[in-house]
Amino acid sequence: MQSLSSTELFRRDLTEQPVLFEEHSGVRKVILNRPSKLNSLNLEMISQMFSKLKIYEDDPTVNAVILKGNGKAFCAGGDVFQITCSMLTGHWSFGASFYKKQLTLDHLIATYKKPLVCLTNGVVMGGGAGLSMHASFRVVTEKTVFAMPEAILGIFPDVGASHFLSKLPGYFGEYLGLTGARLDGETMLACGLATHFVFSKDLPLLEHALSSVDSSNASDILSVINNYACKSNMKEEELHKRLKSINRCFSRQTVEGILHSLEEELLNNSAEKWIAEAVNSMKSASPTSLKTSLRSIREGRGQTIEQCLAREYTIFCNIVRRKITNDFYEGSRAIFFDKDKKPKWEPPKLELVGAEMVDMLFKAIEDDDDWNCLQLPARSSNMLDHARSKL
């Protein structure tokens, strides 16, 4: 058998590490490294990132942290297939344990004491949004694709989505959470999900410039990013026009009312492709998930990040216990296991999902010793958030 050289062994070792950590002067890089899985998150990745970020935060020689992903995606979310298998073959608390650690990592990023620059160059969905949308600087490119498609899977926008979606202009957050609509990088900048837009060809230059910064002052980091950032007034105008229709529809009190308004809007604006896509997406989603998502986002509008994460953890645990709804497992079956993409939701219609059922998903679990409410460590608020909607 031919032996491998030390260089080949080193390269192979790097490809097998799900997260890479690099040092560049006063900057540390955290690189998601599961490109064949679109950098989907598993427990090992979450644990490694949490440990390293804590070390970097306490290290006086570290000025800033860069978070990015290798391959075509930043992060397509949590490894739902792996998580679901662990719960089906073991116990629902396996999924709850993973989710608790994921939310604790999201909380660390949301309250990080040093500048954290997330370079989102590619797909960012679900758990990937939990990593990136809480960062102090969120850089997107022309290759960025953002979505929160959880309702199609039988769950709800989580990982702090009820916090960052609820802070968007008007009812844009409800629109994204209920339809799973995809956004490009320029639209993310216009609505406030991103802080900067940089062309992908300029990202290596930006990374190099950031690595040379010898300060942890947020204004210095901001100045460097601004040297490479671009603006798009056209996207702002386009989104402003769409937001008028979104506000008319998604300001309704109920999911039924929102869907009815969208259908009426479609009759008057049949040329607007996004309206038809929104209607079709909501009709394909879990009715229980839609009602859970709407309530969660609206409660998040008046809550702190800690309150949002704690509520989302409670909802998630109620869902994976399968005593109130089985839609998450049915959605996983249809998308990841049998792949027939034909989930049989229960209840199958919006009008059959009563308020009492939704209430149960938001209530603390009192009849199971395997459950405890989410207890996040006491931390001060994040540095000044530079995200501002351009609308």
Image: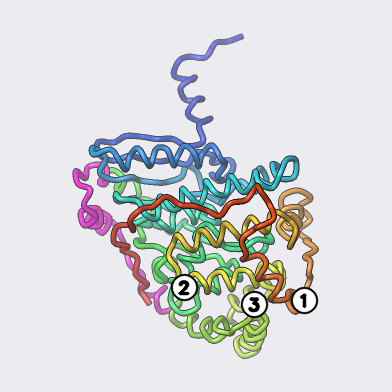
Label 1 element class? helix
- Residue 126: x and y, percent? 55, 56
Question: Disc 2 designates what residue?
Answer: 301
* Front-lying residue, 274 or 30: 30
Graded by Cα atoms within 10 Å as few (under 14), some (14 to 19) or many (20 or more), the crowding at tag 2 reads some
Q: Nearer the viewer, mark 3 or mark 2?
A: 2
Q: Residue at x 35, y 62 (%)?
A: 195
| Position in image of residue 303 (x %, y %) | 45, 69
Closest to the observer, 297 or 281: 297
State the image quarter where residue 388 is shown: bottom left
Q: Please give the residue where the numbered disc 1 appears in the rendered image.
A: 352
Q: Which residues are magenta?
A: 209-238
Image coordinates for residue 148, horizontal then vertical, percent: 56, 62
Mark nearer the N terminus (3 vs 2): 3
Q: Nearer the viewer, residue 246 or 310?
A: 310
Q: Residue at x 40, y 46 (%)?
A: 67
In the image, residue 263 sits, relative to residue 208, either above or below, namely below
Give the residue at mark 3: 276
Q: Are marks 1 and 3 in contact (CB under 8 Å)?
A: no
Identify the residue at image location x=40%, y=71%: 190
Q: Position of residue 300 (x, y in %)?
A: 49, 69
Helix, strand or loop at mark 2 = loop
